[in-house]
Amino acid sequence: MKQSSFLIVFFLLFSLHSFAHKEGHGFKNLTKWTINDKTIEASFLKSTEDNIFLETRSGKIIVHKLSSFSPENQHLIQKKITHIKEINHLASSKISSDKKQSLLLHQSTKRKVLIGLLLLSILLFFLFKRKKPLLVNTFFCSWVLILLACDDNNSEEDDSDDSTDEPISVPANEITQLESFFGNFSNVTTSSDDTYFYVSSTGIPDHDMMVGITNWQQQVPIPQEYTGANSWAFPIQPVLAETPLLSSEHFLRGAIAIAVNGIPIFNPLNNRGEDAFTIGELDDWGGHCGRADDYHYHIPPTHLESILGSDQPLAYALDGFPVYGQTTDELDEYLGKFNDDGSYQYHTTDTFPYFIAGMRGEVTLDPSTTAPEDQILPQAMTQEVRPALTPLAGAEITAFTSTGTNAYSLEYQIGTDTYYTNYSWDENGLYTYEYVDSEGNVTTETYQR
């Protein structure tokens, strides 16, 4: 009888151990990683800046740069990082009540099954008071309990692995949709081939310009020939970049996106690396003129939402991904997000860098330029008429009006004095500029394009 009591106690302790067993057998969450063309098995631990921490089967911690992983691994790591962020932000990572109820029901059912097996084994012991049936029954029930516990852990691990999947490729842009987005503006025409979607315009928007600039380089908007081979272009089939290029470290020359109204959008940083918005270089619509008197934006034209609606793209980045207005969805470090269909899109924010913190898609850099003053190809080129001028200290643009066909007047103030720059051009490409000082004196210059 003493021996039987000892066996019962042993069985109860062993069963309780099975209840408490949560980690399974062997090392969990091992993933095959390709690092510098070598494959290892390890589990993902964490990331800090560009360093990725892994733990091998033996428990050794290893650290590698994100860029040293294969493209597929980088996508997986980015997904894991995003998943961790979602967990840390409960507002965007709450488990639905239905899932909670299902989980509780599953756990409750498991407990009932295990308790039933335990009671059954005890009952069989009292029915057969022999050592052999007792031992057989004890081992049988113990192994059933262990298998059930391990099976539950494996199913949870599989669910976890599924949640880390991220698209390796993204769907192509639909030509008809692109045509409809850019077709909202009569001064924009589009075309396409097998690779690129092309956007042609004069570079002059149909909204007001220049008013609100307090840091002015004396440039004024004139039309540009963004047509034919000099049209703006972006890929119809975007490709996710293995290592996205950060806008803070690249693209200080040229445009990084084209708005649906045909106006190019440059980096929020000017060519000196300054935030063009905060230093007063931009007008009330987020634009100004460059050295070739070419009008362009430096922040997304969110004012176009009043025409397009908030569910339509404002622009397309030169990597082929659309740019939308603000959203309450969580964005990645490039100010974008993946959608359920695998597509990717950027969004705007009120604070720097305002949009496209990095090019999520592949782009080709102009080999004649170097970072940070490099630019994306293909890039439409501007054509200047007069020599570039310099900043005019204390000038604030107060009005900009059309005075006739191909004619404009820009009013600015320095202190209490008012000045004007009046200009026009004819069909032969002759440009006339009149500079009127605060006393009414006029200086005239002409240039032939």
Image: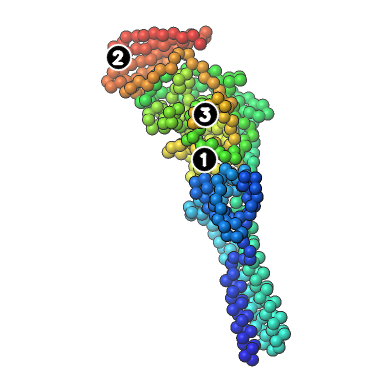
- Give the SS element for disc 2: loop
Query: Which residue is disc 2 drawn over?
Result: 438
**Residue under the image location 38 percent in, 32 percent down:** 278
Query: Which residue is disc 3 drawn over?
Result: 370
Name the one closer to the observer, 89 or 217.
217
Report whether 340 appears left or right of 86.
right
Residue type at numbered disc 2: Ser
Of label 1 and label 2, which has the lower sequence position? 1
- In this rendering, which labeled residue sits more in front, label 3 or label 1? 3
Residue 280 visible in image: yes
Query: Would you place residue 100 above or below residue 296 in this image?
Result: below
Q: Marks 1/2: CA distance?
A: 47 Å
Mark number displayed over residue 334: 1
Query: Would you place residue 243 above or below residue 82 in this image?
Result: above
- In this rendering, which labeled residue sits more in front, label 1 or label 2? 1
- Give the SS element for disc 1: loop
Residue type at numbered disc 1: Tyr
Percent across and percent down for residue 38 are 65, 48
Q: Marks 3/1: CA distance?
A: 22 Å
Percent across and percent down for residue 101 are 57, 63
